[in-house]
Structure formats: C-alpha cells, structure tokens
Image: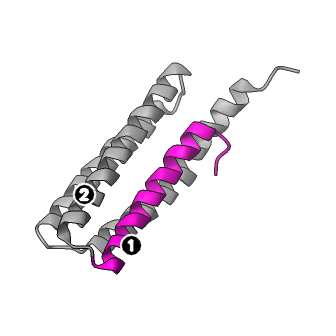
Amino acid sequence: MLGLGEVDEDHRELVELTNRALATLHDGLGSDREEQVTGEIVSALKAHFRHEERLMEACDYPGRAAHRANHDAYLRQVDELIRDYRNRRTSLFHVADTLLDWIFEHIEQHDAPFVQFLLARAEPAS
C-alpha cells in the first residue's frame, strides 16, 4: 500500500474486517455476528489510530495535530454510524461502505504524506 509494513498491515486488517462485515451480511449470519464484527472494526480502528499517533509523536511529525484531529473526527462519525446501525436507522451495508470509503480516503490524504515523511527521514544523507 504505502511502503511502511506496520502501517500497511493495520490498513489491510481494517479493510479485511470491513469486508468481513459485508460477508456477514451476505451470508445472513444474524445480528449477533454483525454486532461482533462492528465491535472488531471499531477496536481495530482505535488501535490503528493509537499506533499511528505514537509513530507521529516519536518522529515529531509536523502534521500530527491535524492528523490526530482527523482521527478524532472520524471516531465521532463512526460512533454515530454504529449508534444509527444499532438503532436500526441505517444498515450494516451502509456502515461498511462508509468505512471503506473513509479508510481509502484517509490513507491517500493523511497517511501517505506521513509515511513519505517517515521514509524520507529514514533515507541516508548523500
């Protein structure tokens, strides 16, 4: 994805979990399994954000405040989306579709510049 194994692995896990939510819907496994999968997605998302934020802090990434604000805003949106799902105001398909859209947008717009910064710092000076 971006060329930084540990961040790329987090992204793959988030996409896999979201795809699993869609598979749960397709397979008709029921609301208990749907609830489990949405919980797994939220837990993985929070763990990924904490991981990124530790990396940003450790390397003194200049864009970390804006990146963290993006994480915080997205977690609020995810909480609202999950609440709407639990209250039957939206579908699991909509939740998963929204999550996938956001994951790819976030990778492109926020994580890619961060990873480029990290990789540039790791390159030996000529």
Which mark is first along the chain, 1 or 2? 1
Q: Amino acid at mark 2?
A: Gln
**Left or right: 23, with 89 as reference point:** right
Vertical placement of 38 versus 7: above or below?
below
- In reply to whether residue 16 is colored magenta, the answer given is yes
Residue drawn at x 40%, y 62% is 18
Mark number, residue 23 = 1
Q: Nearer the viewer, residue 69 or 88?
A: 88
Q: Nearer the viewer, residue 35 or 91?
A: 35
* Residue linked to disc 2: 36
Q: Quadrant of residue 111?
A: top right
**Left or right: 118, with 15 as reference point:** right
Residue drawn at x 64%, y 31% is 118
Q: Main secondary structure of the magenta part?
A: helix
Residue 46 position, x and y percent, is 34, 41
Vertical placement of 34 versus 1: above or below?
below
Q: Which residues are magenta?
A: 1-28
Residue drawn at x 21%, y 61% is 35
Q: Quadrant of the C terminus?
A: top right
What SS does tag 1 mark? Answer: helix
Residue 47 position, x and y percent, is 37, 38
Marks 2 and 1 sit apart, C-alpha to C-alpha, by: 13 Å
Residue 76 position, x and y percent, is 25, 49
- In reply to whether residue 70 is colored magenta, the answer given is no
Q: Residues within 10 Å of mark 1 (few under 14, many from 20)?
A: some
Q: Amino acid at mark 1?
A: Ala
What SS does tag 2 mark? Answer: helix
Residue drawn at x 26%, y 73% is 29
**Left or right: 63, with 121 as reference point:** left
